[in-house]
Amino acid sequence: MQITDKHHITEAIKQKAKALGSIKVGIAPAVKLSGRFLTEWISQQYHGTMEWMARTAETRLNPAKFFPEVKSIIVMAFNYYNPDHSRPAGSVQISRYAVPGMRDYHLVLREKLSVLLTYIQELVPDAEGLIAVDDAPVADKIWAAYAGIGWIGKNTNLILREFGSYIFLGELLVNRELEYDTPMSDYCGTCRQCLDACPTGALHDNKMLESTRCISYRTIEHRGEFPDEWLKTYTDWIFGCDVCQEVCPWNSFARQTELDEFKLKRYSRFLTVQDIKSLSKEEFYQRFNDSPIKRCKWEGFVRNAQNALRTQ
């Protein structure tokens, strides 16, 4: 079935996106972004050892460098929230997005975006597109804000009024002009709970995250041992950190995900240090082969557990 009317194509795309499990979908024109914020962030060395952020900065600011024919950016948001099980004594925490038992969101979102692209090509045979998740050089949170999905909060996460911030974002860059949504207003107001709660002071008043102070960066991206100054503020998070989300008032609206790929039945984000320390390298990669946790590698995971043991 071919549709030529821009309005009906846009509505059909949004309906299909929601049928694929997206809790909210928006579309933005593929314009070049201002580079001030990213340039300042990199100049302050806040990206730490993530040198790819500096290397791909121009592409992140200009989607045409990633996909020259791009006209529109379709943004899909997916809820991954699961309420907590009871926490065992002597356990450590894993960020909610990477709880054992959840499929790696990169794989899930790429599959869903691929289905959406195929659907668009059925509607518009000459349509072409490129898929982006957060490992692509695309400014996903900025495009989500431009597409009316939510706003970027003081904790640098995208926040939805209806769901909070426990969401994954995926983008589909297409070579068709579509109807565009209105950017979302900022509803953080005077609240600063996330800034005050951050255990390491990684969040700045200007919505800038100093990555090298962030527990997520330290437990995932950093290779090797922790400097002594990091250990002074270490907590019981061994993969990522959700503190700035846990205190956010908007996450009172978080609700159980309805996606089977992310819904947990018997798994928990709380693990015991001893269980982790007993994991062999082979067991680690077998258990977390289909999980974001493999990002920190076995050596990093064991290091994080050993550091957490000092806090107990």
Image (cartoon, rainbow, N blue to C red):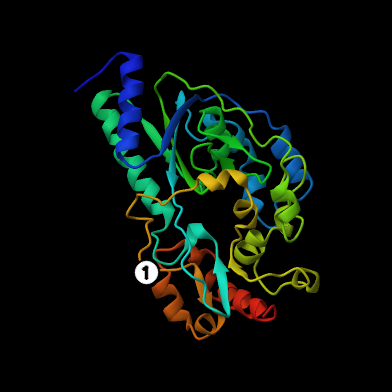
> Looking at the image, is 255 positioned above or below residue 8?
below
Q: Measuring from the top left, give residue 83's x and y in whole percent.
A: 46, 58
- Residue 70 can be seen, yes or no: no
Q: Would you identify the image quadrant in which residue 37 lies?
A: top right
Q: Would you identify the image quadrant in which residue 267 lies?
A: bottom left
Q: Measuring from the top left, give residue 189's x and y in whole percent.
A: 70, 34
Is residue 253 left or right of 197 when viewed as pictured?
left
> Looking at the image, is 274 positioned above or below residue 265?
below
> Looking at the image, is 255 positioned above or below residue 293?
above
Question: What kind of element bears circle 1?
Answer: loop
Nearest to the observer: residue 39 or residue 241: 241
Looking at the rendering, in which quadrant would you find the N terminus? top left
Nearest to the observer: residue 56 or residue 157: 157
Looking at the rendering, in which quadrant would you find the C terminus? bottom right
Residue drawn at x 61%, y 45% as measured from the top left: 249
> Looking at the image, is 201 positioned above or below residue 93?
above
Residue drawn at x 34%, y 23% as measured from the top left: 11
Q: Measuring from the top left, give residue 305's x and y in whole percent.
A: 60, 77
Residue drawn at x 53%, y 70% as measured from the top left: 297
Q: Measuring from the top left, give residue 5's x and y in whole percent.
A: 31, 13
Is residue 121 left or right of 290 when viewed as pictured?
left
Q: Would you identify the image quadrant in which residue 115 lies?
A: top left
How many marks do you count on the picture?
Answer: 1
Nearest to the observer: residue 114 or residue 21: 21
Is residue 271 left or right of 5 when viewed as pictured?
right
Q: Which residue is mark 1?
A: 266
Q: Amino acid at mark 1?
A: Arg
